[in-house]
Amino acid sequence: MVAILPHYDGRYPMIQSYNEEAYCLAGYCDIGDFRFVKHWFGYVPTFTTAPWHRTDDGCLFFIRVDRDLSKLGTVLSYPHQ
């Protein structure tokens, strides 16, 4: 389970070095120009550059990944200007 608090703004993209499946249980999250809303399912393959994440109201996701996220280097910073 991942909860994103209201008024969250991720500002910068990130590179995910794991496969991710997500299901939105409540609320919404704008991911780049796409609005991810309740009852939608998403998939992000390994080494995808995920755009910024932003929400005004907050959201709750059930997320499944194929790696241990406590290990270093699982989420990489994206070089931004």
Image: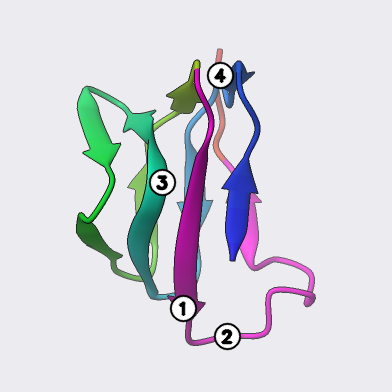
- Does the magenta portion include 47? no
Q: Which residue is mark 2?
A: 67
How many residues crowd mark 4 within 10 Å: few (<14), some (14–19), many (20+)? few
Residue highlighted by disc 3: 26
Residue type at numbered disc 1? Arg
Residue at image location 33% in from the left, 63% down from the top? 23
Gap in angstroms between the C-alphas marked 1 and 4: 23 Å
Above or below — where is 12 with respect to 81?
below
**Secondary structure beneath disc 3?**
strand
Amino acid type, mark 4: Arg
Cα distance in 3D space between marks 3 and 2: 25 Å
> What's drawn in magenta, residue-wise?
57-77
Q: Are marks 1 and 4 in contact (CB under 8 Å)?
A: no
The reply to whether callout 3 and callout 2 are in contact (CB within 8 Å) is no
Q: Which mark is residue 55?
A: none
| Dot 1 and dot 3 residues touching (CB under 8 Å) | no
**Residue 46 image-quadrant placement:** bottom left
Look at discs 3 and 2 and give the one toward the viewer: 3
Q: Residue at x 60, y 57 (%)?
A: 2
Residue beneath disc 4: 11
Image-based side of 45 in relation to 74, left or right: left
Q: Which mark is residue 64?
A: 1
Instruction: Point out residue 65 in the picture as x, y percentages from the top left corner.
Output: 48, 79
Q: Quadrant of the C terminus?
A: top right
Residue 52 location, x and y as percent?
45, 28
**How far separated are the C-alphas under marks 1 and 3?**
17 Å
